Amino acid sequence: MLDAAFLVRRQAPGLLLSSLCYAGGLAFGLAVSAALLVQAGVPAGALVDEFLIATFLTSDGLAQTLTAALPLVLVGLASAVAMRVRFWNIGVEGQLWLGALAATWIGIDGTGPDALRLPSMLLLSAVVGAAWIALPLALKIRFGVSEVISTLLLGSVAFLLVQHALFGAWRDPATGFPVTTAFAEAARFGSLGWGQLHGGLFVVMIAAVLVWFMLGHTRVGFYADAVGLNPKGARATGLPVSATIVGLVLLSGALSGLAGMIIVAGTEHRLNQSVGSGYLFSAIVIAYLARARPLWVVVVSLALGAVFTAGSVLKVFYGISEGMIVLVQGTVLISILMAQFFSTYSLSRPG
């Protein structure tokens, strides 16, 4: 009988089983998403064009996909490195907002020589992002406060700080809209001559390679895995548990802050109310689908960038709402997580 069955964790799911489960989950999620989009008014024949051909197989579409993926890679890495030490950074958007705010301060104030403008914005946005996550980290270490609550609440505080600046001292005097004035050329990433793709690509590539090397080829990666699996056991064997957690969590905040800088200096060239919206959900999706592995974070970010690109087209030409695009992402995520569950556990009955 089914009510007498129980779940048994597989000791080592085979590569074939895992691959089949993931492929099945992805196919199921895409099929349900396609049905939802068709129901919302998108012609079935246009789905392949918008989600594959227009995002990867055309020059303009590929450039737009890469541009959209740049901040996604950084927030995905931010969520992944914190996840490796079981610190749930739900305030990625807040650190991104503060990073964008710090970069904007240099961008519109014109502080320092032109040659140092972008490096200063990079450094300050990373420092501010790390500082913003330091408070929930300290609260967790000192008082045991859940980082899920503290990082989430601080994300709202960061958003309100940005609103205060946009509706106050930084409001564009020429238009009166809640946006800052446009950055000077020295505070913008140079165009690479391919769509909207800009020099921030190299910053993201360097960050991804450094995180990949650190977690995969140095002791930090070994420490992170040990701390994530069993912090008490890691501490009993003499591993630097506290230093590992503090270092990776601060790195998580710094990467989120960098993402904010990449957006305002790369594509927006000013701070506005939409800079950091929607990146929290994306960061969690990317980190989970990539299993917190840096190279897979890049791959999943590209896929999600394609969804964003296709979503923009669908919104313009077919009137699809932003909520429907988020629903499609969530459907694919849940399907893959269900597949992951069935590759990890088997159903067994006594006797």
Image (cartoon, rainbow, N blue to C red):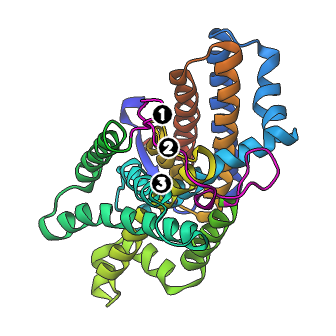
Q: Which residue is mark 2?
A: 181
Q: Position of residue 85 (x, y in %)?
A: 39, 68
Q: Residue at x 37, y 40 (%)?
A: 166
User: In the shown orientation, is residue 101 left or right of residue 144?
Assistant: right
Q: Where 236 sits versus 300, above or below?
A: below
Q: Which residue is mark 3?
A: 108
Between the C-alphas of marks 2 and 3, the distance is 7 Å
Inspect this view and state whether residue 228 appears. no
For the residue pair 117 and 321, the one nearer the viewer reads as 117
The secondary structure that most of the magenta stretch takes on is loop
Inspect this view and state whether residue 107 appears. yes
* Amino acid under disc 3: Ile
The mark that comes first in sequence, 1 or 2, is: 1
Q: Residue at x 68, y 21 (%)?
A: 314
Comparing labels 1 and 3, the label whose residue is closer to the camera: 1
Do tag 2 and tag 3 residues touch (Cβ < 8 Å)?
Answer: yes
Image quarter for residue 124?
bottom left
Span colored in magenta? 171-199
User: In the shown orientation, is residue 322 left or right of residue 59?
Assistant: left
Label 3 SS: helix
| Position of the N terminus by quadrant | top left
Q: Residue at x 51, y 51 (%)?
A: 288
* Amino acid under disc 2: Thr
Q: Is residue 172 magenta?
A: yes
Q: Position of residue 282 (x, y in %)?
A: 51, 43
For the residue pair 217 and 135, the one nearer the viewer reads as 135
Between the C-alphas of marks 1 and 3, the distance is 14 Å
For the residue pair 38 and 305, the one nearer the viewer reads as 305
Q: Which residue is mark 1?
A: 174
Q: Position of residue 325 (x, y in %)?
A: 57, 26
Q: Is residue 14 magenta?
A: no
